[in-house]
Amino acid sequence: MKLFSSVRIYFRYLVTAEAWILCLVSVASTLFFTMFEVKGRRLAVNVSWAFISFAIIFPLTNSLNETFRRRERALECIADVKAYLLSYYQAHRTGTGVRTAEGSSREITSRTCVLFWRRAWRTCGTC
């Protein structure tokens, strides 16, 4: 059942018209340069695979590394927001609010809420 679901999701989201067009263009261009001749000479050339591997693999690995860095920063921001929401919830759940210097409690006002959300936004905005 899981295999069927995975295959269904794969074909629904990854096999699109753009993917088919890209595959067809890739195959057609490869065949064109391999089989087409101009004045008895083929357009295909012998290229070192080391050059091709550097030209493809190096940017790909850098792109993946940057993607994971952005993911980690996003997870840190989500963790900060979750911590702020949890503290906000717990402050309102107790109903006592914030203790003042005299020891009496006062209810959390809308100004306190605004200051809380401003601090949360400023912290998350730096991520």
Image (cartoon, rainbow, N blue to C red):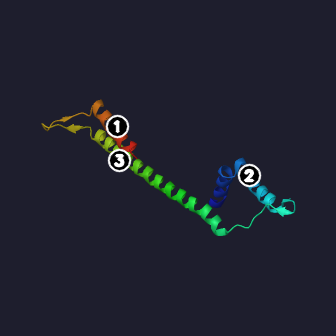
Say whether marks 3 and 2 touch (CB < 8 Å). no
Three-letter amino acid code at the position of disc 2: Trp
Three-letter amino acid code at the position of disc 1: Trp
Question: Label 3 belongs to which residue?
Answer: 83
Question: Label 2 belongs to which residue?
Answer: 20
Residue 57 in the image: above or below residue 105: below
Q: Residues within 10 Å of mark 1 (few under 14, many from 20)?
A: some
Q: Residues within 10 Å of mark 2 (few under 14, many from 20)?
A: few
Three-letter amino acid code at the position of disc 3: Ala
Residue 41 in the image: above or below residue 10: below
Question: Label 1 belongs to which residue?
Answer: 117
Q: Secondary structure at mark 3?
A: helix
- Residue 102, position as x, y percentages in the image: 12, 36
Residues at marks 2 and 1, CA–CA distance in whole angstroms: 47 Å
Closest to the observer: 116 or 64? Answer: 64
- Residue 44, position as x, y percentages in the image: 77, 63
Quadrant for residue 6, please give it.
bottom right
Residue 65 in the image: above or below residue 89: below
- Residue 120, position as x, y percentages in the image: 35, 41
Q: Secondary structure at mark 2?
A: helix
Q: Secondary structure at mark 1?
A: helix
Say whether marks 2 and 1 touch (CB < 8 Å). no
Q: Classify residue 14 as left or right of residue 32.
A: left
Residues at marks 3 and 2, CA–CA distance in whole angstroms: 44 Å
Which is nearer the N-term, disc 3 or disc 1?
A: 3
